[in-house]
Image (spheres, rainbow, N blue to C red):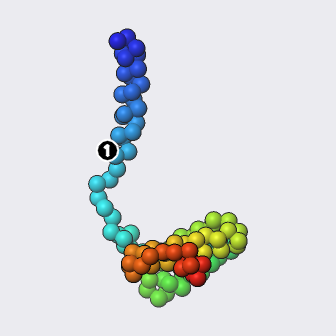
Amino acid sequence: MSRLRATWPALAALIIVLLVPFVARSRKVAAPHATGHETLIIITANNESIRYEFERAFEEHMAREGRNVRVDWRSPGGAAEIARTLASEYASSFERHWRFDLHRRWTAEIAAGF
């Protein structure tokens, strides 16, 4: 019984820490364009200075066109890593489309053909 009393505060603290994120999160669900701007996601291996110059010029150009566009940079690594990431995403999307939209059986031959 004394051992249970000794572990009770630690157990209570653990439960509180696990529940705080759920209680503290916002109950509002933001609309996709609630921020008032569009987002362009770019996957690149370019350095920060190139990204900065492109972003500045692109956002200025789009502002002249009457559109508020922000650039979201993704840099998973070098060009080879980006190619692997994209190939994986395309293959996964194709398999999902094949299986769940077309309701066809996914086989090794289909995967190899893709």
- Secondary structure, mark 1, is helix
Tell me which amino acid carries mark 1: Val
In the rendered image, which residue does mark 1 sit on? 23
Q: Residue at x 35, y 12 (%)?
A: 1
Q: Is residue 20 above or below residue 90?
A: above
Q: Is residue 3 left or right of residue 87?
A: left
Is residue 68 in view from this perspective?
no
Q: Position of residue 83 (x, y in %)?
A: 65, 74
Q: Nearer the viewer, residue 76 or 101?
A: 101
Q: Position of residue 79 (x, y in %)?
A: 70, 73
Q: Position of residue 57 (x, y in %)?
A: 59, 81
Q: Name the residue furthest left.
A: 27
Q: Nearer the viewer, residue 28 or 84?
A: 84
Which quadrant of the rendered structure holds the C terminus?
A: bottom right
Q: Residue at x 36, y 40 (%)?
A: 20
Q: Is residue 18 left or right of residue 62?
A: left
Could you tell me how many numbered marks the image carries? Answer: 1
Q: Position of residue 81 (x, y in %)?
A: 67, 68
Q: Is residue 22 left or right of residue 60?
A: left
Q: Name the residue furthest bottom.
A: 65
Q: Nearer the viewer, residue 33 or 106?
A: 106
Q: What is the quadrant of residue 91 in the picture?
A: bottom right
Is residue 80 in view from this perspective?
yes
Q: What is the quadrant of residue 44 in the picture?
A: bottom right
Q: What is the quadrant of residue 96 in the picture?
A: bottom left
Q: Residue at x 38, y 22 (%)?
A: 9
| Mark 1 Cα shell of 10 Å, populated few (<14), some (14-19), many (≥20) | few
Q: Residue at x 31, y 61 (%)?
A: 29
